[in-house]
Amino acid sequence: MAVFDTGPGIVGLYEYYKDLLNYYIDDRYEYYGLYDRKEINKRIEYLKQFFKKDKKIYVLEFDAINYFKNIKGAEFGKTSLEKNLKDKKILCLSSPLTKREKTLDEFTNGEVQYIEVPLLINASNDQVSDYILKLICDEYFKNFDTDKYSIIFLASSGLHMRKDFFRDYFDKDVFTNVDAVIEDYEYAKENIIRDYFYVTDSKRRFYSRAEGYLREKKILKDRQLLNVSKMSFKK
């Protein structure tokens, strides 16, 4: 079994389940929502060499869903999304690509209003302070009426890491794509000896941000470390 994402938000699943999985992080392209669909699909096709042997892959990169949705063994929380977002009026905080493709519309019969928030996604990935996040939010939403929405949807694993902040900021129910994957998750035992994280770019950058989040949540014990390696590309 494998998990796929483009940034430190991939540990959102590890926070709840430590089932000896392979975690693949395409941090060289963090995050896909800043690229166009053709480039993303080409990139994932290239990366498939690393997880082609995995029988199931959980997709936490929301902008990879439109590639994986018709692939056998790919899971991204579809059942949970449809259940939790039914008949809701939704404000979706998303990447530019999610807004262009209106990805969330496929999983709800409710009304979805998209607002692209690339600065918030970057800030959440980088674990900036709540004070800085609030300043960014105040700028994004200063002329925005959020009272008419019944739920806030965070279409980014990076935003998921700051879910508590957004719940307090909006004073509303908040649901994320990572929540959906966690709810739909089913483990199939495989012969893997430990959780391992594979990155395409910087081990140090990924580790510092992922570890910071997990230590803050008290998931990693004092002497516990993440196993992080760099993917070896075929020439």
Image (cartoon, rainbow, N blue to C red):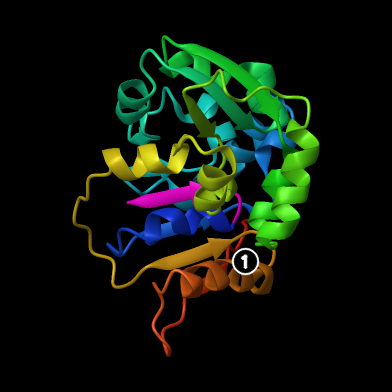
Q: Please state which of residues 151 and 155 is positioned toward the viewer in this rendering.
A: 151
State the residue position of label 1: 206
- Taking the view exactly as shown, the residue that stands out farthest to the right is 139
Q: Please state which of residues 112 and 193 is positioned toward the viewer in this rendering.
A: 112
- The three-letter amino acid code for the residue at tag 1 is Phe
> Is 66 placed above or below 157 here?
above
- Residue 53: x and y in percent read 36, 49
Residue 30 shows up from this direction: no
Location of the C terminus by quadrant is: bottom right
Direction from residue 96 to residue 231 in the image, left or right: left
Q: Residue at x 57, y 58 (%)?
A: 8
Query: What is the quadrant of residue 112 in the picture?
Result: top right
Counting other residues with Cα less than 10 Å from the Cα at mark 1, is it few (<14), some (14-19), or many (20 or more)? many
Q: Residue at x 39, y 54 (%)?
A: 13
Direction from residue 95 to residue 19 in the image, left or right: left
Residue 33 shows up from this direction: yes
Q: Residue at x 51, y 14 (%)?
A: 105
Please tell me whether mark 1 sits on a helix, a strand or a loop. Answer: helix
Number of numbered discs present?
1
- Residue 228: x and y in percent read 52, 72
Q: Residue at x 36, y 16 (%)?
A: 86
Answer whether residue 213 is magenta in the image. Answer: no
Q: Please state which of residues 132 and 181 is positioned toward the viewer in this rendering.
A: 132
- Taking the view exactly as shown, the residue that stands out farthest to the bottom is 223
Q: Please state which of residues 142 and 112 is positioned toward the viewer in this rendering.
A: 142
- Residue 109: x and y in percent read 41, 9
> Is 171 placed above or below 123 here?
above
Answer whether residue 3 is magenta in the image. Answer: yes
Q: Which residues are magenta?
A: 1-7
- Residue 129: x and y in percent read 69, 63
